[in-house]
Amino acid sequence: MNPVERLLQEEVTHFVDRLASSIPPDGVASHALTAAARIRLDDAEAQLAQARASLVEGYGCWRRALEDVENLWALAAWRSTAAEEASEHPAPLAA
């Protein structure tokens, strides 16, 4: 589990704790939700799932971009070192 997934899991855990503390001990009867409220709840849950997926995907893109930048800086450093070594040890001249 990556750091974003851990954070999201922690957020869901806190959400469930808050939700549990606001619901009566005997629960909520299924008929307590109107059809309109059920539709709104289903939509909100779908949006939540989509937002989570977007965050996890975005974090994957972030990690790949970080790796790309790191690799490019490492390549630049390697080329710089190679160029310095080449200038310190000039190639022998051909006869």
Image (spheres, rainbow, N blue to C red):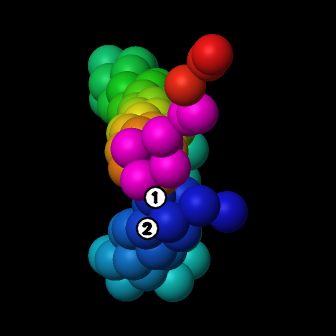
Q: Name the kind of residue labelled 1 in the image.
A: Val
Q: Which residue is mark 2?
A: 7
Where residue 24 sits: x, y (%)? 42, 78
Magenta segment: does it hold 91? yes
SS at circle 1: helix
Q: Is residue 78 visible?
A: no
Where residue 58 sits: x, y (%)? 41, 33
Q: Residue furthest right?
A: 1
Local crowd size for mark 2, using a 10 Å CA cut-off: few (<14), some (14–19), many (≥20): few
Q: In the image shown, does 95 or 74 lie closer to the viewer?
A: 95
- Residue at point 46%, 74% (across, down): 10
Q: Name the kind of residue labelled 2 in the image.
A: Leu
Question: Are the two marked residues, 1 and 2, in contact with CB atoms closer than 8 angstroms?
Answer: yes
Q: Which image quadrant: the N terminus?
A: bottom right
- Residue at point 63%, 16% (across, down): 95
Q: Is residue 62 left or right of residue 91?
A: left
Q: Is residue 41 left or right of residue 49?
A: left
Q: What's drawn in magenta, residue-wise?
A: 86-92
Magenta segment: does it hold 95? no
Q: In the image shown, does 66 or 58 lie closer to the viewer?
A: 66
SS at circle 2: helix
- Residue at point 58%, 33% (across, down): 92
Q: Which residue is mark 1?
A: 4
* Disc 1 to disc 2, C-alpha distance: 5 Å
